[in-house]
Image (spheres, rainbow, N blue to C red):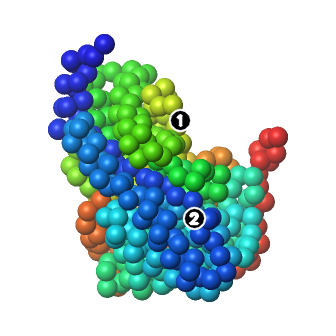
Amino acid sequence: MINTKDILETINMIDNENLDIRTITMGISLLSCAGDDIVRSAEKIYDKITRSAEKLVATGEEIERTYGIPIINKRVSVTPIAMLAAASGGDPVIYARAMDRAAKTLGINFIGGYSALVHKGFSAGDRELIASIPEALSTTDFVCSSVNVGSTKAGINMDAVALMGGVVVKTAQLTADRNSIGAAKLVVFMNAPEDNPFMAGAFHGPGEPDLVINVGVSGPGVVRAAVAKCPDANLSTIADVIKKTAFKITRMGQLVGAVASEKLGVPFGIVDLSLAPTPAVGDSVAHILEEMGLETCGVPGTTAALALLNDAVKKGGVMASSHVGGLSGAFIPVSEDAGMIDAARSGVLTIEKLEAMTAVCSVGLDMIIIPGDVSPATVSAIIADEAAIGMVNSKTTAVRVIPAIGKSVGDELEFGGLLGSGPVMKVNDAGSSELFIRRGGRIPAPLQSLKN
């Protein structure tokens, strides 16, 4: 039976607490577009993307009008392009431009999948794609890129880690005139999921169906408001409140995904439970932690509070969806979270503390602005540290850092929109990691990889 109280509560969440569907993302397999003629293959890519997702934006807007639920982004993810580059040879940037052209035709805000999966080594096409990332991201507007450099089963491909430090820095340099935004569209993964609807790390994994709809929900503001109503509750009660709130948020995502699937005639994949913050006031994961009793995000106790939040979100959300996937938990992207921005500006929140927090939450060091003169080896070492956390803890971790070319610690960088803004944060560069990174090879998988 429809409960009037629940309806009014949901309306209040949307109107006053920033509740929304962050994205509906259509995954599209491009394997049928592979061929030895790269120009012809790129045209097939454009044709398949625009044909498959032709009604994606219109369907999202129709669902918004019908149910009154804001759907902020409509996106597409595709098969890792390195797999197509292996068949065609040639300059992979041709593929990036075809993807960008398709995104503009469709009216979506991002397209992900300019990606390579190199967790156990490089196959044909991988090195070429990785080398082309700076040019691809600097000459397109909507293309996002990701590279998976390791897994719990395979260990860490340190040769790929070494390459990616230079790729991140060069991408920032080539987009220095646009606040180094190219690096904001590039993620380096450990244990990358194949069904992630969020950018910049979305790609359509080889094990996915030809077409699929995945949904990413939001709702930090809703969770914060729920916690605020329990000022004297103990942490057991707080966890229960978050679970119940996450259930309500996820049910909305399940509804949108099911309706979009039916209207588009595309299978419904997963709901990603992740709490995705924005720079808007009242839509911050950091503010949830502060509502629990921390004066500022980053003080001692922050990692414990985040662990509670992440676990409660998963427990509540998993009961509300037929299939859960993607990243699912709490995001802590600095420039995209108003509370994180304030904590970083004050100096309370440091990169070292953020690294500790990534051991207990979704993803990793995300949307962190670092000095523009950082060395590629230092970026590679940051990637290696984060990959090690993901490997040992059997979880997805990632690094999306933005070297702010021409700026130093304390300066500000402004991206606008969901990417937000933030201060340039200090990187511990008292000593060099270059020799360690230069060694290359692979860091072996931990013992828990032998679970079979």
Q: Nearer the viewer, residue 119 or 95?
A: 95
Dot 2 falls on a residue whose secondary structure is loop
Visible in this render: residue 321?
A: yes
Name the residue that disc number 2 marks: 30
Q: Residue at x 82, y 40 (%)?
A: 452
In this picture, is 244 found above or below 326?
above
For the view shown, which residue lies furthest in the top direction?
1
Q: Nearer the viewer, residue 41 or 334?
A: 41
Name the residue that disc number 1 marks: 323
Point out residue 23 in the picture as x, y percentages from the top left corner: 37, 50
Q: CA distance from mark 2 to mark 1?
A: 24 Å
Location of residue 166 by image quarter: bottom right
Amino acid type of the residue tagged 2 in the rendering = Leu
| Disc marking residue 350 | none
Dot 1 falls on a residue whose secondary structure is loop
Q: Nearer the viewer, mark 2 or mark 1?
A: 2
Point out residue 42 in the picture as x, y percentages from the top left corner: 53, 77
Q: Is residue 338 left or right of residue 110?
A: left
Point out residue 37 in the picture as x, y percentages from the top left corner: 62, 83
Q: Nearer the viewer, residue 54 or 327?
A: 54
Is there a contact, CB below 8 Å, between mark 2 and mark 1? no
Q: Residue at x 50, y 55 (%)?
A: 27
Point out residue 379 in the picture as x, y percentages from the top left corner: 54, 73
Q: Residue at x 69, y 56 (%)?
A: 151
In this picture, is 198 found above or below 262?
below
Amino acid type of the residue tagged 1 in the rendering = His
